[in-house]
Image: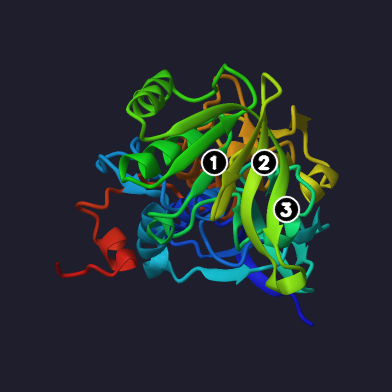
Amino acid sequence: MNAISAEVVIIGAGPCGLFQVFELGLLGIQAHVLDSLKAPGGQCAELYPDKPIYDIPALPVCGAQELVDRLMQQAHPFNPQFHFGAEVSELHRLESGRFHVKNNAGTTFDAGAIVIAAGVGSFQPRRLGVEGAEAFEGRQVHYRVRGAADYLGKRLVIFGGGDSALDWAIDFAAKGTPVTLVHRRADFRAAPASVARMRELEAAGKLRYIEGLAQSLAVEGAGETAVMRGIEVRGADGTLHPLEADHVFAFFGLHPKLGPIAEWGLELEKKALRVDTEKFQTSVPGIFAVGDINTYPGKKKLILSGFHEAALAAFAIQHHLYPQKKQFLQYTTTSPVMHKRLGVTGT
């Protein structure tokens, strides 16, 4: 199979990768986007699609999946080519200065530049360490909330002490859904305001809190027809608490792995790619990195920061691809060229 010729290959279809498509498109550069997941959105869509985000400029509140949908709409005029469901397995620089890229579906690319927007790398949620839980994953044991409305009124047990666990426990309890929150220790990693709100709901009898660990599942039936009826928790004082549950959510965070990225000869610092703050270029010329995958002095792992990085990286990529071309900063409000690229000519 012949390699697909691409101006730019973006590895990662999370928010930063999608916004990179837009920033490159404004400069007249088209991108192919590769992701191991089966749909765009990265960590946002995979782990907390219904969770609200409050720090996107001009959007006081925006659901994670809504943000992904908006970014896809914004990128649409630039006709990005998406390749989902296959992890990038090979990346190396050719003698020509271009790059060979291959995913584990066997698709190969000949690219002028690379943007790595892979978030924390390939990741898996930390799983519920209870025998038999794996058989119920996706049915009654979950590591993310998809379609929150489906769980309203059900008996829920939520494990974890971070923002995701408390945010969802608060959200469900405030809507009258019976919730038990379980955390292994008295200290929480969540925002203090969330902890205070959880305690208010507990005091009001709208939420139950247990300091303890999961011990075993209560299961009815066997094989594919088995149904989980509850989960037993051992409290910090040794007391066993049999909890009825229709669904169990475990928010223990991610177990990030760089995966093949660690083998591509790029300079690393604490499992992140070192970049400069002018071009957001890695130690290999022509390979750039934006979003949570990169590191530099003062780095903040915010979507907002990743958007800024993508804007500067786009100009650096343009210069890398077309060094003889003069660069102009044009504004989308007034530039006829930008209007044409955006498909809004004449408006």
Using the image as rendered, state which of residue 122 and residue 17 is in the foreground: 122
Q: Is 53 above or below relative to 322?
A: above
Q: Label 1 amino acid?
A: Ile
- Counting residues from the start of the chain, the first of labels 1 and 3 encountered is 3
Q: How many marks?
A: 3
Q: Is residue 22 left or right of residue 176?
A: right
Using the image as rendered, state which of residue 160 and residue 61 is in the foreground: 160
Using the image as rendered, state which of residue 221 and residue 184 is in the foreground: 221
Q: Dot 1 corresponds to which residue?
A: 158
Q: Are marks 3 and 2 in contact (CB under 8 Å)?
A: no
Residue for point 14% across, 67% down: 347
Residue 232 numbered mark, or none: 2
Q: Label 3 amino acid?
A: Ala
User: In which quarter of the view is residue 105 placed?
Assistant: bottom right
Q: Dot 3 corresponds to which residue?
A: 133
Residue 279 is situated, as x and y percent measured from the top left of the image, at 56, 37
